[in-house]
Amino acid sequence: MTKPVVEIVTFTLAEGITNEAFLEINKGTEAFVRSLPGFMHRQLSQGEDGRWTDYVTWDSMESAKAAAAAFMTDGCTAELMKSIVPDSANMRHENLLWNMAA
């Protein structure tokens, strides 16, 4: 049995990209992300320091890594990738060990 994996990506927006514009750009990737095998959940947050965090839950490490590779090459994600300062991005995959929902 595979265990869910959380992909956590922290980054800073590129100069000239507003928060509102970035959220709209992300909406443009929704259908693509939903179509990827193993997708379970995604959310974005922004810290007081302005840095963003993208949390995506996948059904397995295999799905998470395949999705990360696909995300870097799909045409619909190009605008999103241009919206992020490249050297600011940090991605990691972690096993989801416990989850509590409302």
Image: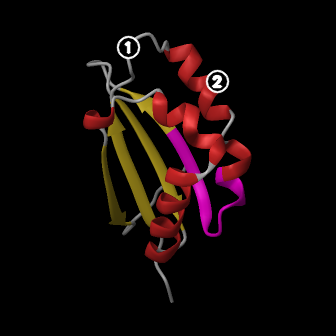
Marker count (numbered)? 2
Residue 9 picture quarter: top left
Percent position of residue 79, x then y = 57, 31
Q: Residue at x 58, y 41 (%)?
A: 77
Q: Quadrant of residue 76?
A: top right
Residue type indicated by callout 1:
Glu
Q: Secondary structure at mark 2?
A: helix
- Dot 2, crowdedness within 10 Å: few (<14), some or many (≥20)? few
Q: Please state which of residues 76 and 62 is positioned toward the viewer in this rendering.
A: 76
Question: Relative to 96, is 82 above or below?
Answer: above
**Residue located 51% across and 89% down the image:** 1
Q: Secondary structure at mark 1?
A: loop
Residue 51 in the image: above or below residue 1: above
Q: Residue, x 54% and y 71% (percent of image)?
A: 59
**Figure check: 34 above or below 62:** above
Q: Which residues are magenta?
A: 33-43
Q: Which residue position is annotated with label 1?
A: 15
Disc 2: which residue: 24
Going by the numbered disc 2, the residue's amino acid type is: Glu
Q: Position of residue 68 (x, y in %)?
A: 47, 59
Residue 54 percent across, percent down from the top left: 44, 41
